[in-house]
Image (spheres, grey):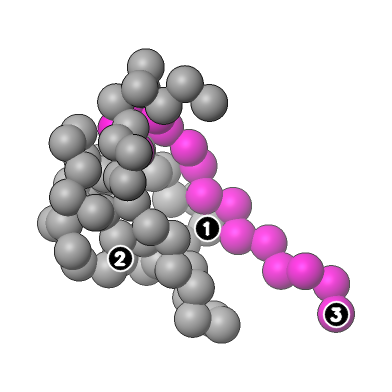
Amino acid sequence: LDGKKYGISRQHAIFLYDGSTLSIEDLQSTNGTRINGFKLIPGEVYPLHNDDELEIGRLRVVVRLVRAPS
């Protein structure tokens, strides 16, 4: 996906899911991670919500949480 072009580190961030909440943790990335413009503190876990704007380096994505049909 050409991550280098967008300032994404090889081990930039990790997504975590505990069965009910999706979260993200910045892994000491060079160019940082943001949720809705708020810079994440590396090593801290932040919950993600529907329509959050996530910036991983200079790549921007909108979070869409969808439940799979039962």
Q: At 42% from the left edge and 32% from the top edge, which residue is drawn?
A: 60
**Residue to which mark 2 is pinned:** 46
- Quadrant containing the C terminus in the rendered view: bottom right
Query: What span is in magenta?
Result: 56-70
Mark 1: which amino acid?
Answer: Asn
Per the rendering, the mark at residue 70 is: 3
- The answer to whether residue 36 is visible is no
Answer above or below: position of 35 versus 67: above
Q: At 52% from the left edge and 58% from the top edge, which residue is drawn?
A: 50
Give residue 3's position: percent from left, percent from top: 41, 27
Per the rendering, the mark at residue 50 is: 1
* Cα separation between marks 1 and 3: 20 Å
Q: At 30% from the left edge and 65% from the top edge, which residue is drawn?
A: 46
Mark 1 residue element: loop
Q: Please say whether residue 64 is one of the residues in the magenta stretch.
A: yes
Q: At 41% from the left edge and 43% from the top edge, which residue is drawn?
A: 53
